[in-house]
Image: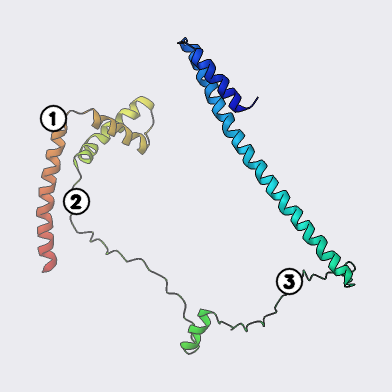
Amino acid sequence: MTVQQLNSNNSDDSDDMVSLPPEEEIYRRKYQLLLERCEVLQQDNERIINRIHEVKKVTKRYRKDIKLVIERLDRHGDPFRSAVLEMDTKSETVQRPARPVAKVQPVAKQTDKQNGGKKTGAKRKTKAEKPEKDPNAPKKPCNAFFQFCQEQRPLVVAEANSEVGAEPSKQEVTRQLASRWRALTNDEKRVYVAMFERSKEKYAEEMTAYNIKKEQ
């Protein structure tokens, strides 16, 4: 049965059909889509068959032409059957003359010749020397935390000696001082901030006197 017959049968059935339930309507729609797809495939098959027939005709014509050429060559006594076809498959390689390579002297030797045979080594970079601090110059004041540490350090060391019976390490003392500093309130810290401000004023006065004495 061809696709046209299926389509005709389907059209007859569709005329007799009444409204179907939704589920059956879905299957009917799928059936229609399959029929359309079959029709497309049949058209493709017909085109392929026509193409095959054309190729067969061309091949048949070529065979007749080849047979005709062979008959003519035989009538003229041409020994084409025993002829050997020589095909050179080797690729021709052209040898190019090697280019002369110029000798390049190292850069160090060239610079030596330019400088009259003197060796020129790379200059080592030296760090900028820091100016030496004057031991007589006034010392900068410590901030509020270090003011607190200077005051509380002896107390922390004494408490550790009484509890452990040995002098604590510097790391342990610093840890205890930092913990106590964090436990202070803002009002308690203001005492050490005021000490730092007074130290800055004193440092400014000492620096002024130091600079005047240094210029004399």
Which colour style is shown?
Answer: rainbow
Residue 179: % across, % down: 28, 30
Question: According to the image, label 3 marks what residue?
Answer: 91
Question: According to the image, label 2 marks what residue?
Answer: 140
The tag earlier along the polypeptide, 1 or 3, is 3
Q: Secondary structure at mark 2?
A: loop
Q: Residues within 10 Å of mark 3 (few under 14, many from 20)?
A: few
Mark 1 vs mark 2: give the one in front.
Answer: 1
Q: What amino acid is found at the position of numbered circle 2 in the picture?
A: Lys
Q: Would residue 108 be found to the left or right of residue 155 on screen?
A: right
Q: Secondary structure at mark 1?
A: helix
Mark 1 vs mark 3: give the one in front.
Answer: 3
| Image-quadrant location for residue 48 | top right
Residue 63 shows in this picture: yes
| Image-quadrant location for residue 156 | top left
Q: Residues within 10 Å of mark 2 (few under 14, many from 20)?
A: few
Vertical comparison of 133 with 73: above or below: above
Q: What amino acid is found at the position of numbered circle 3 in the picture?
A: Ser
Question: According to the image, label 1 marks what residue?
Answer: 187
| Image-quadrant location for residue 166 | top left
Q: What amino acid is found at the position of numbered circle 1 in the picture?
A: Asp
Vertical comparison of 61 with 39: above or below: below
Residue at (56%, 82%) from the top-left corner? 104
Residue at (53%, 23%) from the top-left corner? 32
Q: Compare residues 163 and 139 and report the one nearer the observer.
A: 139
